[in-house]
Amino acid sequence: MTDSVEIRGLSRAFDGHTVLHDLDLDIREGEFVALLGHSGCGKSTLLRILAGLDDEIGGEVTVPARRSAAFQSPRLLPWLKVWRNVVLGLPGRPDRALAVKALDEVGIADRATVWPKTLSGGQAQRVSLARALVREPELLLLDEPFGALDALTRGRVQQLVAELWRLHGCAILLVTHDVEEALLLADRVLVMDEGRIAHELSVELPRPRDLTAPEFVTLRARLLNWLGVTHTLEGTPS
Amino acid sequence: MTTKPLAAGVLSKQDLPEAPEPSARVTIRGTARTGRRFTVPRSVRRAAGPVGLVLLWFLTSATGVLPESVLASPVDVVRQAVELTRNGELPSAVAASGRRAAIGFAIGASVALSLSLLAGLFRLGEDVIDSSMGMFRAIPWVGLIPLFIVWFGIEETPKIALVALGVTYPLYFNIYGGIRSTDAQLVEAARMMGLGRLGLITYVILPSALPGALVGLRYALSTAWLALVFAEQINADKGLGYLMSNAQQYFRTDVIVLCLVVYALLGLACDFAVRILSRRLLTWRANFEGEA
């Protein structure tokens, strides 16, 4: 299988402060990669670079031309009806049938003609996913898209993302700080620290994955350990 | 306030904030409309204030508390309104004034729109235009009347120019502010979705500036009428200002009040139009709409 993303010697500094240090990373076509790390470790910077939103970089980055993203907040344009948000920026006249099809895929085709202000947080995030997927991306960038959702909604949207990924077969880079989310969804989990990929873990558990399986728990403990988090009931999380 | 060192686990009872009385409870009363309760329609409540004031005016005039030399009674004002409408003086005055306001507004709005777009969309434009606008705004525009008379004479031009000037500032600053308050996250998302520069302006930046622009429009329209009142004091030979300065010479408070009322009504009509426009254009907004 060929690589969808190739990063060689990537570095990025903000006002002399280096955020990414000489980073190398490959993502295969159709691979689901989760990127874990503490806030400020550079994971969002990396995602913005892959999205093409930041080009003041050193090194070389090769990405598919067809890529799209969903962010922590849905970032829908409040003055466009939901379906117009979905097909925003696509060439030609706004294609309503296409938008409804994409919305149907995320389960909210019935909300196509409402204003975004009437959507719940989960619904808005679904629209944001539909907007990303209607572009048939080869690389989908997800920047903590479940971060602002309540636990129940988050579980449902995570499942949806897993299904959509199977359906579309695009490569996904998911930035998150939720270890379980990374293990539930990804083929490979990367742990970033101080602008480098510090650890890497292949997740070969069968899908759909079980949070309570012993292998899952072992992997989770290893990731938490890499992240420098120890969970014991008496102690305070460090 | 003194601070005591806190020994963990030995918080004595008196250190704890005083607990509310165990029996203190509040009742939350429902405000859901039951349909049985009689409520005064909002429009009636809004009209009650102005109508009450006019009624007070009428009563004080009728009883002689308010002499006619100070302020004519509303009855006289209405009589004048009918009279001047019948002989065509009032309609032609309104038409003349309206024409000045419209032309002045159109010029001012075009200038404001072009300047604010240049300043809002381009950094070069901002550097050149915005500081100058800030400087010019410090000049009270009414004070420019003498200069305008020197430049443009005493015909229509200085009047239209004054209206245009008054309209320019509120529109410029509100549209510019609106453009610059565009959410950078939305711009980023839209760029990610493949919008180019023109698409960004049409789909993201201008809609986001729209609420501010409409506020500016409201200010601008009221300023337009205000500027007209000032401008029409300059040697007018037609228009509401002419009617008013004529009346002043003959101490006709009824005509003066009538002109003021007409100015006010024209201003209100514009304001109403903008409010309707806002409601239609801003249905997408999720805003606080006031307590019932």
Image (cartoon, rainbow, N blue to C red):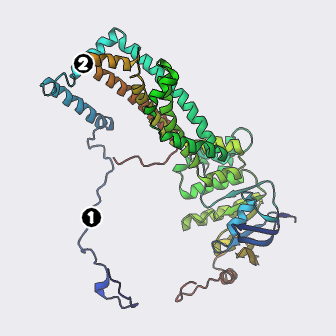
Q: Is residue B264 above or below residue B178?
A: above
Left or right of residue B115, residue A219 in this image: right
Q: Is residue A31 above or below residue B282?
A: below
Q: Residue furthest top?
A: B87
Residue A113 visible in the picture: no
Distance from label 1 to label 2 (Cα)? 62 Å
Name the mark nearer the viewer: 1 or 2.
2
Q: To which quarter of the image does residue A156 belong? A: bottom right
Residue type beneath disc 2: Phe
Q: Is residue B272 above or below residue B204?
A: above
The residue positioned 72% from the left and 68% from the top of the image is A13
State the image coordinates of residue A196 (x, y, percent, origin top left): 75, 75
The residue positioned 29% from the left and 14% from the top of the image is B82
User: Dot 2 surroundings within 10 Å: few (below 14), some, or many (20 or more)?
Assistant: few
Looking at the image, tell me whether mark 1 or mark 2 is earlier in sequence order: 1
Q: Depth check: A20 or A232 in front?
A: A20
Q: Chain of mark 1?
A: B
Q: Chain of mark 2?
A: B
The residue at which mark 2 appears reads as B251
Q: Which mark is residue B26?
A: 1
Left or right of residue B284, residue A86 in this image: right
Label 2: state its secondary structure. loop
Q: Depth check: A53 or A190 in front?
A: A53
Q: Is residue A17 above or below residue A224?
A: above
